Image: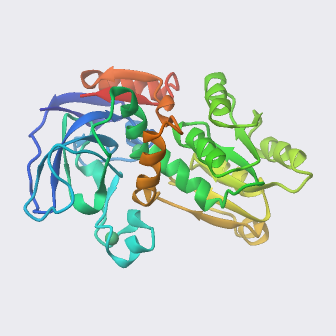
Amino acid sequence: MKGAVLYGPGDVRVEERADPTIVEPTDAILRLSATCVCGSDLWPYRGIETYPGPQPMGHEYCGIVEEVGSAVRNIRPGQFVVGSFWASDNSCPICQSGYQSRCVDARLMGLEGAQAPFLRVPLADGTLVATPELPSADLIPSLLAASDVLGTGWFAADAAAVAPGKTVAVVGDGAVGLLGVLAAKQMGAERIILMSRHESRQKLGLEFGATDIVTERGDEGVARIREMTDGLGAHSVIEAVGTQESMLQAMRSTRPGGHVGFVGVTYEVALPGMDLFMSTVHLHGGPAPVRRYLPTLLDLIWRGTIDPGKVFDLTLPLEQAAEGYRAMDERRAIKTLLTP
Ligand SMILES: [Zn+2]
Ligand SMILES: [Zn+2]
């Protein structure tokens, strides 16, 4: 099969890779219906994160089960399934408490390379959730979004304690931030302020349920949020970028006693001690336990209640993965869907 491989900064190639096979009896092999490029794939693409050698890419996936290992009980060939970017057993005490991304046996799906026609999924019974039937083609982008960006945006809103009547601010207008808006709307937020300066992203944010747009960022952005909330700050803030500036912007936009849900990967972030001490906000985040939310999210998609697939504003054949990366890197696309 042909899959996407990153050779170094800016150098993605689609080349021959070995077909995945059952390695452990708990594995499943999927024939992917769609895959995509993630904002987090841009970290190694930009050389901020480095690999020792050529690295198969991709960790977001959905598709049809081809084959299962001898120990797989609940998943069977022919089912359409979605899984998280972390494989998990869904049975250890950490999974049972809802933090499957930190399962004692968590496996990073990025290592399997999901930007390919076939994918090995470890711990299939714990990781994969099947749809009631085979989905129609128009549902595929939304089901794919559930694999990461929707689940991550949903976790961010949950971690930020979004609830009816609350004012929510969203820092970051990438796919995760936009789906954080969608999640906040579903959770009944009264006011949802999206911080964005890109017209197409603002438009999609409003479609997903944002009530206000703030174009200022940094200290000016914080001042705008305070102005809009009687000087108090938002109840709930979703941080979906992961830089020093965005993290401080999120903390300072939150009222005392409020909640920050942070899901941007915080590579270089260092919180100043006194900002942390005086903030009196709840900070909760990290790699989203998407598996916790998958049954709920698939159900909402299946009934047509939500359409998170709208974040894919560019669809390319897998062979053109390099252009998919470039378009996202240059912010010409919010998110690229790749068809194997
Ligand atoms: Zn991702
Ligand atoms: Zn577990």
Q: Give the residue at x 38% y 39%.
A: 144
Q: Which quarter of the rendering shows the C terminus?
A: top left
Residue 267 spot, x, y in % from top left: 50, 54
- Compared across the picture, whether 184 is left or right of 306 comes to right
- The reply to whether residue 263 is in sight is no
Outermost residue, right side = 230
Residue that appears at 36% across and 30% down? 10
Seen at 36% across and 34% down, the residue is 36
In the rendered view of the protein, which quadrant contains the N terminus?
top left
Left or right for 150, reference 121: right
Position of 14 relative to 293 (above/below)? above
Q: Nearer the viewer, residue 302 or 109?
A: 302
Instruction: Answer yes or no: is residue 240 visible.
Output: yes
Q: Quadrant of ligand 2?
A: bottom left
Pick out the residue farthest to the bottom.
Answer: 93
Residue 48 percent location from the top left of the image: 43, 44
